[in-house]
Amino acid sequence: MPPLLDGFLAIIRRDLLLAWKRPGDILNPLFFFAMVASLFPLAVGPSPEQLVLNGPGVVWVAALLATLLSLNSLFLSDFEDGSLDQIILSPQPLPLLGLGKAAVHWFLSGLPLVLVSPLIAMTYRMPGEVVGIMMLTLALGTVSLSLLGSIGAALTVGLNRGNALLSLLILPLAMPVLIFGARTVSLAAAGDAVSAGIYFLAAYCMLALTLAPFATAAALKISNE
Amino acid sequence: MTALLSANDLCLVRGDRCLFRSLNFALNPGELMFVGGANGSGKTSLLRGIAGLLDFATGHVTWDGRKILDDYQLFRSEVVWLSHRVGFKDELNLIENLQFESALRASSMDKSAPVIERLGLARLTDLPFRYLSAGQQRRVALARMLLAKARLWLMDEPFTNLDKAGQGLVAELIAEHVGSGGLCIAASHQTVEIAAPTIRVML
């Protein structure tokens, strides 16, 4: 029996290599995020009070939608070319392989969002310390979203046009992340205490990290029948 | 004395159609099982069921006396799977694809050069997988089987897309694998002579 982390590392290495060879997949959600977040001020008006008020919510909604957008393809190409059969039939623990896919997804879609968000925050006139809080909430939130999303992506991989269904499945689970994420940034902007929200996001992230890989593995086996 | 791989009273239902029922077989090291039958008779489903990828309505498959799903991870380390969807990434080249496979299976790539040579793929190692012809892609899938060091080969339509020489090569590889104490279950609508003790099953 191979060591526990072999498959985990192998799938991370392969998916990063694949992403390197088709960079469009990473840039799409990032463009979407930047576009939504920067179009919003044009539509609602550029008055500073409004921007400060709306900023956290807009950034968070854009991040959530951008993540959902990229989730659909998480297992799709593996399913279509038969790699999923091979992965399921490899002597590796399937939850760890699912975790590996989710990790790469976060690294390629969640992390870029976190890194780009300060630029967006600047257009919403967020002060420096609030930007830090926002990045922290986004980092914790996008990890949860990638993990939860991997369950939905695994469940819908065999369906044609599973995208709408995927969003429907994931949104209820993602709501707490959105609410606490956006609210924490708002509180930070208003100068209130933020630790409770951050603790909640961290706890939710840990919960997803512990449970999602097993759910993903079970879902993959069901949809690959 | 029970056989290494055996199936009791298998019945498979897809949709509302029963593809087969009361199917039994027993397979020992050094034996090949050849599953024949028309298109849609359930050959692929039978193989997927044996691999544990889908559930039989009744019956179960045992490996070394235990139901395969009871110790699925052990079973998976003994099996390698070939089907019409070869399961390689279009963007990666042959070596990168096989490296991923060997990492999953903790097998080494040391012996890959002679295998690639034998399968006639030596000149294609730098090309992205999508530039390979269907037959060449099948040959890469054969390379996976040879490198995997698994005892049980499950092959769905192993002769498809291959030229005469390729089909002969597949027959030769199966005979060698079975001859060295391996097990093989091959499903095909074509009949190709394979020099190995063969159990025939018609669906």
Image (tube, grey):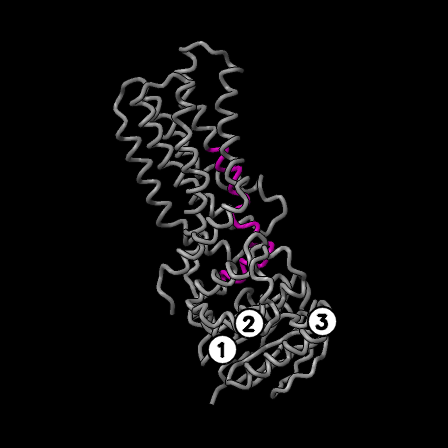
Task: Identify the subunit bearing mark 2.
Answer: B
Estimate the spatial distance between the alpha carbons at disc 2 and disc 3, rounded to whole Å. Answer: 28 Å
Q: Give the range drawn in magenta.
A: A64-88
Magenta region, mostly helix, strand or loop?
helix
Q: In this view, does B29 lie above or below B159?
A: below
Q: Callout 1, which amino acid? A: Arg
Q: Look at 49% across and 16% down and name the residue there.
A: A41
Rendered location of residue A165, percent (x, y): 56, 42
| Residue occupying the far top of the picture | A47
Left/right placement of residue B72 relative to residue B22 reads left
Label 2: which secondary element: helix
Q: In this view, does B16 lie above or below A145?
A: below
- Residue B132 placement: quadrant: bottom right
What numbered label is drawn on residue B151?
1
| Residue occupying the far bottom of the picture | B1
Task: Identify the subunit bearing mark 1.
Answer: B
Q: Callout 2, which amino acid? A: Ile
What numbered label is drawn on residue B122?
none
Between disc 1 and disc 3, the foreground one is: 3
Identify residue for label 3: B163
Rendered location of residue A156, percent (x, y): 55, 48
Rendered location of residue B22, percent (x, y): 62, 78
Estimate the spatial distance between the alpha carbons at disc 1 and disc 3, rounded to whole Å. Answer: 26 Å
Estimate the spatial distance between the alpha carbons at disc 1 and disc 2, rounded to whole Å. Answer: 14 Å
